[in-house]
Amino acid sequence: MGDVNEKDEAAQEPGWGKDGITPHPNSNPLRSGGEDTTYVSLWVDWGPDWASLKRQLEIRRERAQELAGLSELVRNEVVFGIRPSGYRMGGKGVSLPFVVEHQGISIGIADTQVPMSGQANVDVRIGSLPLMEWGGLDVAWPVVRELILRLGGQMLRNQVRRMDMCGDMAGVGVEDFEKLISSGHLITRVRKQSWHKDSGRWEGFKYGKNSISIRIYDKIAESKCNTRKLAALICHRWGELPSKATRIECQVRGPYLLAWGIVSVEAYVKYRGGIAQYLTQKWWRISDCPVDRTNTSRAKLHPLWCKVVDAFSAWTGTEATFPAVRSSGRCDGAILLRQAVGCIGSMVVVESDGRAMTDNEFIKFAATRFHKMLRSIDIQKLLREKRKRWMADGPSEYSTDWQRILREEEDDAA
């Protein structure tokens, strides 16, 4: 399978003709921001026509390999582009050998008629251009649902894997934010950061990693070589070509959304106002004056950052509530292993009466106790019970201490 560059792959537009599904690019009025790149996992039942669809995909994929580019597949009066190779969901997840594209929407399809072992069998990636040209996810998501239907599938459920939310500021430069941050106005618990200069001029910076991050960058410099994107920005964001323009882009991935009880696209749309408020007024913000760490009162926002908050709330709404947060959420093996290591560490401290020990002594002590415990249980029975629960409820039912994990990630502990 070919590797997928997440940002670049989601932004590719095959440019097929009018289809009666997608809106006209110029139908969206001027907005202060919107969703950018979006990834969604789908659980799809392809029904009894799966064998026919699979064969068509295989044939058109072979043709695409011969062309070293996209080939065409027509399904229910919609023209799709078929890519010559697939990829793995998230880089290491489910294999998706078939990739179809339509008007900037990429759909990766697993070689299975129905979801297996509770795992999603379809990966949808919506590029930045259709989201900007059509007016955001409110318009793009119904298009995705219709495309799945036209391909012959029934969407059973969906889960957001990545959501980029942005606000655009015309007439404001990256250096305006840099000066305030350098002067001590920034309030955040995030430590990881990266800054970028070109010819001595600030082009952008990023704070955060993994499940949540914020990027502030020169949008004109980023899009000047892409005439279609620049035209879309003028038409749908700026109104005219400004002398300078900055984008504030917040990326949130599955673990954070799940911690807030937000799983589906529909839930995200309902609560995105609260997400934007958290990101721009709690998680990362710029204060009106240099931060005094000894003063416990809440600092006021800087006027420039107030404009950023307004740019987000203008399109997300001002709803600040979240659904009730469950103590469970989807987790992968790495998170479960992280929990297990913590439990083993506590066990060693308790059973050794808190005595100090070297790394090798710890490993030997823990391995001995763990092996003894495993020999005393019915392992096959345990596996049957866990697999039965996984099949019945899906991975979202596995308990995870999300608040602790996210807090550690925010602190960026070394």
Image: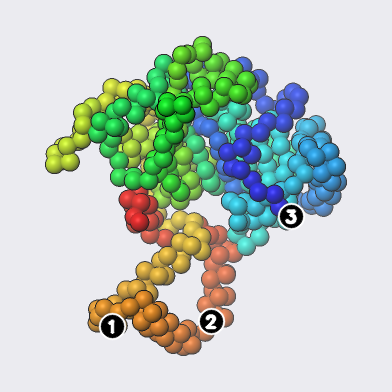
Q: Amino acid at mark 3?
A: Asp
Left or right: 342 with respect to 225? left
Near-viewer residue (54 or 93): 93
Location of mark 3 (residue): 111
Is 339 above or below relative to 222?
below
Which mark sits nearer the N-terminus, 2 or 1? 1
Task: Give the spatial CA distance, label 2 vs label 3.
Answer: 31 Å
Which mark sits nearer the N-terminus, 2 or 3? 3
Left or right: 178 with respect to 393? left
Q: Amino acid at mark 1?
A: Ser
Secondary structure at badge 2 equals: helix
x, y percent for residue 178: 34, 29
Identify the residue at image location x=30%, y=83%: 351
Dot label at residue 379: 2
Identify the residue at image location x=61%, y=37%: 8
Which mark sits nearer the N-terminus, 1 or 3? 3
Is 303 above or below relative to 394?
above
Location of mark 1 (residue): 352
> Is residue 115 in view from this perspective?
yes
- Local packing at callout 2 (Cα closer than 10 Å; few below 14, some 14-19, many 20+) is few
> Mark 2–mark 3 contact, CB under 8 Å?
no
Near-viewer residue (375 or 152): 375
Secondary structure at badge 1 equals: loop
Foreground disc of the pair 1, 3: 1
